[in-house]
Amino acid sequence: ISLYPQDGQDASELIRNADAAMYESKRRGRNSLNFYTEAFTAVATNRLQMETRLRRAVEHDEFTLHYQPMVNLATGQIVALEALVRLKTPAGSDATLPSIGPGEFIPVMEETGMIVALGEWVLHEACRQGKAWLDAGLHFGRIAVNLSPSEVRRGGVIERLSRILRDTGLPPEHLEIEITESGLMESGTSAEQFLLMLYQLGVSLSIDDFGTGYSSLAYLKRFPVHQLKIDRSFIQDTPGNVSDCQLVSTMISMAHGLHMAVVAEGVELTEQADFLAELGCDMVQGYLYSRSVPA
Ligand code: C2E
Ligand code: CA
Ligand code: CA
């Protein structure tokens, strides 16, 4: 809502300010109403600037991938890498521009549909790099690529994936897709079809941020899930917090009972690694081993 005369002198200013108020209502979880205040313009302007910057980045190829190793807890060897997208600071641009991470820009890209172009670029770049490493005789196990639920919903991922595997020559057994459990649930029946085709392509599937989504465990027996990644929030207070220890232990037993491998995310301390080793956790990932680094 914006009101004449305090919020604008003409129709276009009133509409623009009503739009800023509407954006704020959406941000507060929709189904709410807001009167325009000047603070909303700042929020809307920031958001618009971010969108413009991202659009530019998509057009000018300003993304890059960093990789974070997953380590086999028993042998200490790197058995997989997770590809994590970064926004490059374009040459000659304003150095004071705040750097934004994927946690911030991925949701905007999902909302605007730019995620499809980004997702395709990420997959292609990860597969290309993986093939280059294999050709150089470097063994990294598998490369894990994050897939956004909205990419699955929008469709066409399998077609893109098989084309990219063919074009880059990366053998599918070296590729792993990470998707969150809520992502799977939201994708509805199309998810089932999607996962089956993924399986037929020979690509493995990993459930990301396991334990944080609202979902039914039934999908674990229905879908060909190869691995669970226990969310960092469960790991962070181990081994001090008794309930977290119990939950982690239960998740590991459940995964093993269902013949799935388990990765613990966000391992930062040796005490956490020791605790996870005792429970028989297969793999670990986190700052204790390495941050995400360029290829
Ligand atoms: P995620 O998939 O859960 O990725 C793990 C995040 O945890 C990464 O943040 C990683 O840098 C961070 N991390 C790893 N080890 C530790 C640790 O020991 N301690 C702490 N505090 N953090 C750790 P990042 O790179 O900022 O990515 C954030 C999220 O953005 C990712 O969460 C993922 O959901 C999304 N994302 C990143 N790259 C892509 C992509 O290419 N496509 C899509 N769709 N999403 C992506
Ligand atoms: Ca992930
Ligand atoms: Ca995760």
Image (cartoon, rainbow, N blue to C red):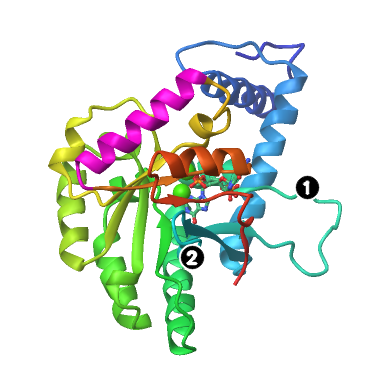
Residue 75 in the image: state x and y as whole percent.
46, 62
Q: Secondary structure at mark 1?
A: loop
Residue 247 in the image: x percent, y percent?
Answer: 40, 25
**Residue farthest bottom in this picture:** 136
Residue beneath the point at 78% across and 47% down: 98
Given contact means CB atoms under 8 Å apart, are the residues at marks 1 and 2 in contact?
A: no
Please name the residue shown 46% across and 18% down the image. Answer: 243
Of the residues shown, which amino acid type is indicated by label 2? Gln
Q: Label 1 to label 2, Cα distance in Å?
A: 36 Å
The image shows residue 242 at horizontal and vertical percentages of 49, 19
Residue 9 appears in the rendering: no
Range of residues picked out in magenta: 242-259
Q: Which mark is residue 77?
A: 2
Quarter in which the N terminus is drawn: top right
Look at the picture and state if 16 lies above or below 142: above
Q: Residue at x 20, y 67 (%)?
A: 201
- Could you say which quadrant of the image residue 153 lies in? top left
The kind of secondary structure element at disc 2 is: loop
Q: Residues within 10 Å of mark 2 (few under 14, many from 20)?
A: some
The quarter of the displayed image where residue 191 is located = top left
| Image: 159 above or below 265 | below
Which quadrant would the C terminus be assigned to in this image? bottom right
In this rendering, the answer to whether 36 lies above or below 276 is above
Residue under label 1: 98
Residue 46 location in percent, x, y? 71, 37
Mark yes or no: residue 265 visible. yes
Towards the viewer: 206 or 285:
285
Q: Is residue 246 magenta?
A: yes
Query: Is residue 293 found inside the magenta-colored segment of the image?
Result: no
Say which residue appears at 58% left-offset and 66% top-offset. 59
Q: Residues within 10 Å of mark 1 (few under 14, many from 20)?
A: few
